[in-house]
Image: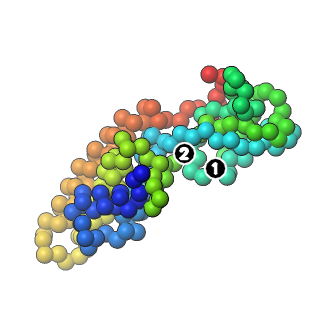
Amino acid sequence: MTTLADFRERMRIDLQDPDGERWTDAALDRHFGRALAELSRAAPREARLTAATAPGSRELSLAGIPGLLGVARAEYPAGLEPPAFRRFAVFGSLLRFEDGPLPDGSDCRLWCRLLHEADDAGSTLPAALEDIAVLGATASAAAEAASGTLERLTLNAGTAAAYAAMARERETAFRQLLRELGGRGRLRARRAGAP
């Protein structure tokens, strides 16, 4: 499983900073986090979560689901075959079941789209998306370096221009890949019915 340290190493290679002289780990982590959030919106992590309902209430708080981008389907009660998908509406951090039996405190299942995560233990990114995340992160880092280099005295007069060109090239490629991914990763309307 690819860790945040592995992503940093790949970013340093792409940015030609293998010894970490220009970017701190914290700076690279910030750029990677930004790219990861953008990538998650185009190709979110999908998960099926179980939550307890409140007896006598059609409302369910979503506030405890970290990184929630949206809910695609809701099943209540959970575990039936075929699944008992319900119509629902989401407003802020509340999901409201609009049909079916009044919840009695038993579990429901939510099909969610979530932000991807990366830390020193691993990442939720599929291998096919790892290079795209690194591309976006290095575009952001190069853009920052281009603007920061303009304010510093450097021995190489072309440093700012080189970083600016790298940033443009990588940002263009990153945006194109996000557009290509976006068609299959877009959230559905906040209301879903039976399949």
For residue 142, the mark is: none
Residue 89 seen in the current view: no
> Badge 2: how crowded within 10 Å, few (<14), some, or many (20+)?
many
| Outermost front residue | 1
**What residue would you read off at disc 2?**
114
**What residue would you read off at disc 1?**
65
What is the secondary structure assignment of the residue under circle 1?
Answer: loop
Q: Earlier in the sequence, mark 2 or mark 1?
A: 1
On the image, which quarter does residue 161 sit in?
bottom left
Residue 170 seen in the current view: yes
> Given the image, on which type of amino acid does mark 1 rest?
Ile
Q: Tell me where residue 9 appears, x and y as whole percent.
A: 31, 61
**Which residue is painted at 68% across and 37% down in the image?**
109
Query: How is the protein colored in the picture?
Result: rainbow
Q: Tell me where residue 158 appears, x and y as whole percent.
A: 13, 65
Q: Is residue 84 left or right of residue 165?
A: right
**Which residue is painted at 76% across and 43% down in the image?**
52
> Given the image, on which type of amino acid does mark 2 rest?
Leu
The reply to whether callout 2 and callout 1 are in contact (CB within 8 Å) is: yes
The answer to whether residue 56 is above or below residue 115 is above
